[in-house]
Image (cartoon, grey):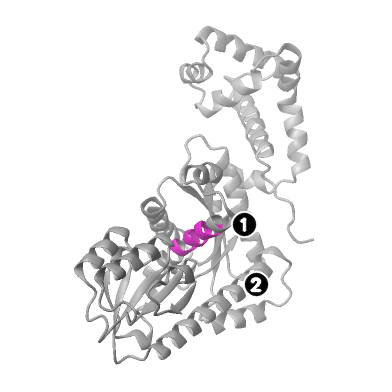
Amino acid sequence: MISCSEIIKLPSLAKLTIVAGGSGLDRLVRWVHFIDLPDVIPWVQGGELLIITGIGLNGDIDKLKNIVKGIIKKKLAGLIVNIGPYIQAVPPEVISLADQAAFPIFELPWEVKIIEVTRELCSHIVMKQTEQRSIKDFLEQLLLCPLENHELLIQRAAYYGYDLAKPHQIAIISPRRLNEFLQEKKVKDEKALVDLKVCFEQIIREVLTMHEKKILQMLWADDVVILMPYENESTGIQQNKKILSKVLQQFTLKMPGLAVTIGLGGRFESLQVARQSYLQAIKVLRFAEFQVASTPIYAYEQLGIYKLLFEIEPDKLFMYYQEVIEPLNHYDHKHQMDMVVSLFIYFEENCNAAKTAKRLFVHRNTLDYRLKKIEEITGKNLDNPYDRLTLQIGVIVGKQMASEIFPNDLCR
């Protein structure tokens, strides 16, 4: 899908000028309609770019205002008015109406042939749709399944102007608490949800375009997966984080209330290991889920000890958890206590007893009793750095298991 801002860059629309609703140029165009009926409202559905000459309006400004009100209500992408004998200029009243609604209205000189405009617009829309489907197809092959012919994928990407022969990394942009956001925005039907996801993807595409980055991306479930160039090994991560920070700013501006987390996989030089970066980005997002002080962007190469734990087989980590933490779980079940939760929060608060007691809503003496009991049950001394690290790793592994940090293989 293309936006109104892309349309004005097409060769046949060089003489097109925007006269109203300039703040709405990010509206997406599903298709183009040329309709010259006095009442066009029953013939449009939403998302169209409408073209009119005004031949049926007989110069009636009120009728034009009603058309604009109607197509704004039906959520069309924009309006092109063919300026000439029937409408000599878009009236100020209509311009004011469109500006208030951030609804783009364009003027097209009479000498420009509408047939040429519609042909190029429709052709461009179809081409973009085909390109996006093709990009999603080979990104799925690249990231979700074992790669058989990476040279073919490089050639296919090059056809659309993407250079996959250079080093890259995978970024996954994932909305958090999406259901809450949908309820707040009263998104109830499938069409509205699809529109929201398309808008989500379009915001990302526009930011990347502003940075003159031609970057592959695809919508996958609720997330957007991006293949980001990473040529400079020393500065690439910071450059990509800077671009992704701009993406977050645009989300705050255009989709207020939507919380977003970004996970970055590791750098790779060969497409044959691109899937590894993708799986790393997934692990990073799972890691972000159990962070108390959550930040918007996490990178796999900056996770410290978690990188090491991510590479250990899940069954071995489970055995470690059973050995270190399970005795506390057993005690909790038997005595209806909260030893495990207390230990988890104690470490989250950097072993600060006062802050831990406050978060647990217990007296400091109660917490001191629990900590001594934890030492007794586990046989570990919380004042001993080695014992404390042993318990901390057990807590980390427990969080990983609770968040299903190790994803199932997506292509078997």
**Residue receiving disc 2:** 137
- Give the prevailing secondary structure in the magenta stretch: helix
Task: Please provide the residue range marked out in magenta.
Answer: 194-203
Q: Quadrant of residue 75?
A: bottom left
| 107 vs 210: above or below | below
- Residue 269, above or below 120: above
Q: Nearer the viewer, residue 85 or 50?
A: 85
Check disc 1 and report the residue beneath it: 221
Query: Residue drawn at (69%, 63%), measured in percent from left and top?
Result: 144
Amino acid type, callout 1: Ala
Q: Are discs 1 and 2 less than 8 Å apart at CB?
A: no
Name the foreground residue: 289 vs 266: 289
Q: Is residue 199 magenta?
A: yes
Please give the name of the residue rendered at 31% of the width and 85% of the height, measured from the top-left corner: 14
Query: In the structure shown, which secondary structural element does the residue marked by tag 2 occupy?
Result: helix
Looking at the image, can residue 4 be seen? yes
Secondary structure found at label 1: loop
Indicate which disc residue 332 carries. Answer: none
From the top left corner, tell me how far across and down residue 212 is, in percent.
39, 72
Q: Is residue 233 magenta?
A: no
Q: Position of residue 33 (x, y in %)?
A: 45, 78
Going by the picture, which residue comes out furthest to the top?
A: 365
* Quarter of the picture holding the C terminus: bottom right
Task: Work out whether mark 1 precedes mark 2 in sequence or the reverse, and give the earlier one.
Answer: 2
Q: Residue at x 39, y 80 (%)?
A: 36
Please tell me which residue is depicted at 37% across the width and 69% down the height of the picture.
210
Q: Is residue 235 visible?
A: no
Crowd around label 1: few <14 · some 14–19 · many ≥20 (10 Å): few
Q: In the image, what residue type sits under mark 2?
A: Asp
**x then y, percent, for residue 305:** 59, 42
Left/right placement of residue 20 relative to residue 279 reads: left
Q: CA distance from mark 1 to mark 2?
A: 14 Å
